[in-house]
Image (tube, helix red, strand yellow):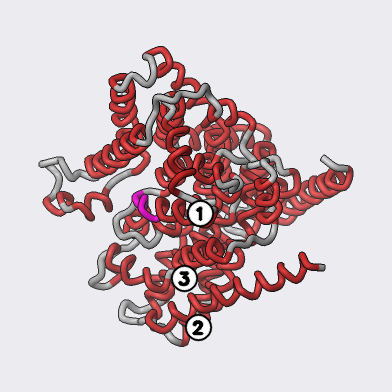
Amino acid sequence: MTKAKKIVLLIAVVVIIALMVVAAVTNKDGVEGTFWSLFPPVVAIGLALITKEVYSSLFIGILSGALLYSNFSFTGTMDTLINDGLISAVAGNAGIFIFLVELGVIVALINHAGAAQAFGRWAEKHIKTKVGAMLATFALGVLIFIDDYFNCLTVGSVMAPVTDSKKISRAKLAYLIDATAAPVCMIAPISSWAAAVSSNVTPDVAGDMTGLELFVRAIPFNFYSLLTLVFIIAIAVMGFDYGKMAGFEIKAQNGDLGILAESKNAENSEENTRGSVLDIIIPIIILIVTSVLALMYVGGFFDPEQPDYYHNFVDAFGNTDATVGLPWGGLISLVIIVVYLLCRRHLSFKQAMEAVPQGFIAMVPAILILTFANALKNTTNLLGSDTFVNSIMEHASGLTALLPAVIFLVACFIAFATGTSWGTFGILIPIVLSVFDAGDPLLFVGISACLAGAVCGDHCSPISDTTIMASAGARCNHIDHVSTQLPYAITVAAISFVMYIFSGFVPNAWIALPVGVVLTVGTLLVIKLITKKARAK
């Protein structure tokens, strides 16, 4: 760390301590439901961006939340930190941790069998350009729309050899993964995200509409998700980068792809020339099929005792739990893949078992960050952040036409500060439904603004689970991913904000969406011209 950064860090720590003293003095009855409820995530995010070190930053954020919640009591702070924070975070995400390890083991198996190298050789022959590699990564991300965790880890594992061969940095790969994970799931009616949104919609406030119907009707106005996809295609075809991403891409052209040191050993395992492209395609197909079937099973699709409507594919997904279904699918597919690779004689049983600890070790950074991030969310919830946000929205309810833009900004802020889209849905959807009448065209614009803002804030936040998963999938430094992604995400967010102002007065998707597409492409053309002139000087 440079001397300048050490000084900035010292100043930041002094400011944090001073603010906490102010909070304790001015709120003797507690800070629950006040703007101090968002102080812990702001501390964690700020420190992470200053120090580039995510573990200590998250821990300090959790500690500050525990201190505020317990009113600086030692035993209360420890109880909040350990029980309500860390233990609850591990217990609540045990299924996802298991799924992470399962996928890590599958990736290690594929590498041992030589399938990744074979896929890389195939890609060198058939995907000729850097643009082709980026668009292929984009296409695979769009195809895997069931769940964002599944998307991040699968796309990263499959496409890393392709993007490496075309000298695309791992930071760029992480962006492509992240930008086709949550945004795609957010506009896919059959996904874990659609189920999460639907679960927050009750008939008493939505009229005759089901949660899924409201979700589908809001899709055309989900500008951030839709325009992010346009943005990816446009920037790939235009062939330029800006912000910190440009620096990482220049390094990649010189051979420094930005791969995590602990991942290089796993990825650069001994060369196995017996592997073929089928040995990566078939395991991925097995993983997708078993995961979908497992999600349907958990949703009651195959249970004769469940009501008839759960035997519908869409309703089963609305009733499923990804934290249970994905570990089911991951374990079954792992066993089948081991048997398949042993039958193909591409690796021995001993090598297959060696892949188990290797897969676990590769996922330890993601598991640690997820644990700390979720502990931070838990302490933020204890401080009553939802109550504070509710009071803000009540004061903004008189803006009518400008309300979608306000909702978008509020959702962005909550998701960025808390690192959760789903938590943002839970806070804002009931508020939005109470603000607009069931027959008001602005209802769909308002709901889409809530969903788009949640995805945007989640996309930008260094403590977001999806952002963490994208870093894990690309095997790149987490803070590098966040810092390179921010300029791109903020560009699309700014365009989306303008479009929500426009849609507040013209709530017609057939008009608004084409305007948004033109505005996105036009903005990129201007940025390209500016960056070209700046480099020429």
Q: Are marks 3 and 2 in contact (CB under 8 Å)?
A: no
Q: Where is mark 1, residue-wise? A: 134
What amino acid type should be assigned to the residue bearing mark 3? Phe
How far is the residue under mark 1 from the one under mark 3? 22 Å
**Image position, residue 372 (x, y; %):** 58, 38
**Is residue 283 left or right of 302 when viewed as pictured?**
right
Task: Identify the residue at image location x=50%, y=83%.
Answer: 502
The residue nearer to you, when weighing 288 against 404, is 288
Q: Residue at x 43, y 38 (%)?
A: 119
Whether residue 29 appears in this view of the structure is no
The single residue placed furthest to the bottom in the displayed view is 505
- Cα separation, mark 2 vs mark 1, equals 32 Å
Magenta-tinted stretch: 142-146
Q: Earlier in the sequence, mark 3 or mark 2?
A: 3
Q: Where does residue 201 sit, x and y in percent of width and height?
A: 33, 63
Label 3 element class: helix
Label 2 vs 1, first from the N-terminus: 1
Q: Which residue is mark 2?
A: 502
Amino acid under disc 2: Phe
Q: Which residue is label 3 attached to?
A: 223
The x, y position of residue 30, in whole percent, is 63, 51
